[in-house]
Image (tube, grey):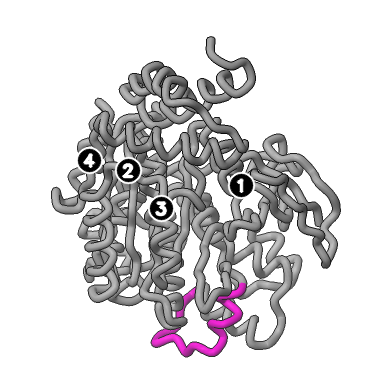
């Protein structure tokens, strides 16, 4: 294995790769595992069991240096989210209150709205970190128009499974580790997919094929048959298979709850991808997934069986829908929900749009479940500026006079009007110029 360095997340070990090694899955030292572009990391060395820790230069705070390097890109990394959240006390209170309700009710949802640069991703990072610290399992997916698109439910499922993380007693568990623990769990009723997985794990018959299959990798029927896995049902890749994906997710959320977690938090970032597919059919399929996720998170009991009889389905332009208007695969219709409550909490972020589907998606969430991010105040940016100065001084072992700091503040504070990202980048740029060239 390779040890690599990422400018935002620091050092980590490569544990997987995909797309001809153009993307790497890296387990970073700060405690998270992410897919990153191979071009964004620098190879340090081969992984060896005993690692020699570097001694930091005198007067230099390496953690502060990593934060500054992230700010240089306009990003607040995971490990700095809590200390670098300003002006969001109300929003954080709403998030904590809803997660507390979820812990007791077994379901819930939130919609985070805001213009580009308003801090939606930052709030998603905050929720992820808060969830992991408070006994929730967390998955995070960033949608895109081509691969992880709303109208490709299996790919969304694949990324949710890949990013599944749960921290308990100081140990971090991913999907594979959780499923190994789940072999001691007796399901209340058979699950078409998960029951077969657990039986194979109990027999010790799991292999790379089995894990790729259940994690949503593209495994065709022919390949399963060739490997003599005739009884394994294919996880369908076609666009109407919303029911298959949600049936799987709710089965896993049941298991996650039984393993001691309060529930599974699903973070769906870049939800506005649906509004820019430029295809009416793709928009309809994507909306069907969003609608299904919301109703599943609410524990809609109509979705436990959905009257799964052929005569009760209506064939529409996008596939077969049940009597409640929920889309199903024509190959093997399945219930959306395995068990109620679902122990699933959905958080979706969107950027406002003129698309009719923006209105339809926001209407899925009650007003009380929407967080609209407004621009930060000048006072918030001033507090942030003071914190950046403190970190920058620690990172590079430099000090500046009052007049120098005031000049930088005067030039950068107005950048707050352009959003958090631009403010961070501009402030670090100004401080770099001052450090290298002095007053200009």
Residue bearing mark 1 = 61
Residue bearing mark 2 = 86
**Is 188 contained in the magenta span?**
yes
Part of the protein shown in magenta: 177-192
In percent of the image, x 28 and y 51: which residue is there? 291
Residue 82 image label = 3
In percent of the image, x 46 and y 81: which residue is there? 259
Residue 372 image label = 4
The earlier-in-sequence mark between 3 and 1 is 1
Residue 9 at x, y percent in the picture: 60, 47
Real-space CA distance between mark 4 and mark 3, rounded to the nearest whole angstrom: 20 Å
Looking at the figure, which quarter contains the N terminus? Answer: bottom right
Residue 371 image label = none
- Packing grade of label 3 (10 A; few <14, some 14-19, many >=20) is some
Residue 194 at x, y percent in the picture: 52, 75
Real-space CA distance between mark 3 and mark 1, rounded to the nearest whole angstrom: 18 Å
Real-space CA distance between mark 4 and mark 2, rounded to the nearest whole angstrom: 15 Å
- Figure check: 305 above or below 371: below
Residue 13 in the figure: left or right of residue 48: left
Q: Secondary structure at mark 1?
A: loop
Q: Nearer the viewer, residue 301 or 81?
A: 81
């Amino acid at each position: 294995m390779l040890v690599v360095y990422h400018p935002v997340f620091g050092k980590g070990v490569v544990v997987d790769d995909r797309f001809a090694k153009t993307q790497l899955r890296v387990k970073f030292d700060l405690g998270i595992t992410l897919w990153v572009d191979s071009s964004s990391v620098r190879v340090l060395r081969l992984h060896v069991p005993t690692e020699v820790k570097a001694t930091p230069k005198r007067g230099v705070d390496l953690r502060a240096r990593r934060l500054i390097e992230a700010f240089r890109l306009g990003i607040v990394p995971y490990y700095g989210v809590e200390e670098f959240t300003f002006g969001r006390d109300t929003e954080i209170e709403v998030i904590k209150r809803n997660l507390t309700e979820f812990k007791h009710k077994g379901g819930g949802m939130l919609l985070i709205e805001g213009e580009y640069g308003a801090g939606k991703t930052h709030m998603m990072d905050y929720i992820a970190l808060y969830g992991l610290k408070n006994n929730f399992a967390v998955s995070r997916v960033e949608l895109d128009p081509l691969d992880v698109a709303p109208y490709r439910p299996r790919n969304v499922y694949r990324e949710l499974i890949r990013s599944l993380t749960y921290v308990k007693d100081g140990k971090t568990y991913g999907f594979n580790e959780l499923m190994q623990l789940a072999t001691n769990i007796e399901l209340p009723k058979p699950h078409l997919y998960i029951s077969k997985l657990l039986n194979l794990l109990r027999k010790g018959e799991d292999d790379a094929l089995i894990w790729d299959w259940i994690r949503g990798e593209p495994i065709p029927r022919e390949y399963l048959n060739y490997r003599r896995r005739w009884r394994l049902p294919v996880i369908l890749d076609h666009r109407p298979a919303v029911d298959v994906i949600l049936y799987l997710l709710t089965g896993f959320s049941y298991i996650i709850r039984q393993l001691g977690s309060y529930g599974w938090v699903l973070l769906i970032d870049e939800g506005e991808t649906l509004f820019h597919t430029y295809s009416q059919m793709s928009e309809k399929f994507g909306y069907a997934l969003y609608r299904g996720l919301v109703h599943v998170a609410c524990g809609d009991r109509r979705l436990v069986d959905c009257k799964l009889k052929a005569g009760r389905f209506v064939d529409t332009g996008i596939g077969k829908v049940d009597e409640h208007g929920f889309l199903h695969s024509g190959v093997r219709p399945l219930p959306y929900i395995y068990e109620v409550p679902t122990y699933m909490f959905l958080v979706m972020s969107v950027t406002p749009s003129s698309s009719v589907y923006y209105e339809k998606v926001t209407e899925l969430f009650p007003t009380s479940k929407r967080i609209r991010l407004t621009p930060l105040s000048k006072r918030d940016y001033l507090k942030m500026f003071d914190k950046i100065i403190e970190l920058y001084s620690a990172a590079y072992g430099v000090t500046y006079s009052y007049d120098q700091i005031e000049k930088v503040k005067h030039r950068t504070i107005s950048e707050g009007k352009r959003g958090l990202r631009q403010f961070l980048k501009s402030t670090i740029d100004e401080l770099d110029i001052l450090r290298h060239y002095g007053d200009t």
